[in-house]
Image: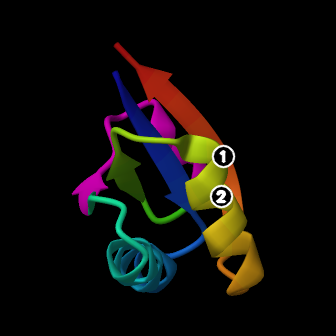
Amino acid sequence: MKNIIVTGTVTYAIRGRDLLRNNGISATVERNSSGLGRYGCGYGIVIRSDVDKALEILNRNSIKVIDVTKIN
């Protein structure tokens, strides 16, 4: 399962990816599928690990998260 953390901008997605990587969480930035683009930029942070820990890191570093989508 992968989790897509939708951010407000592609800049937030890149900054968030880098923060997560620096904290030991494997993360990539991907263009969202058509249904997820309604939230703004159309990019999100993709992780396959503990989403709660990732959200805590992003929140602590002022990365605005708009939505989290789980895809099997």
User: Which disc is residue 1 wearing?
Assistant: none
From this viewpoint, is residue 37 visible? no
- The answer to if 29 sits in the magenta stretch is yes
The vertical placement of 70 against 30, above or below, is above
Residue 9 image position (x, y, % from top left)? 51, 76
Q: Which residues are magenta?
A: 28-39
The quadrant the C terminus occupies is top left
Which quadrant would the N terminus be assigned to in this image? top left
- 67 inside magenta stretch: no
Q: Which residue has dot 2 on it?
A: 55
The answer to whether 32 appears left or right of 23 in the picture is left
Q: Which residue is mark 1?
A: 52
Name the quadrant containing residue 13.
bottom left
Please tell me whether mark 2 sits on a helix, a strand or a loop: helix
Question: Do residues under tags 2 and 1 come within 8 Å of each other at their CB atoms?
Answer: yes
Amino acid residing under circle 2:
Leu
Give the structural element (helix, strand or loop) at label 1.
Answer: helix
Image coords of residue 47 (percent x, y): 36, 47
Give the amino acid at mark 1: Asp
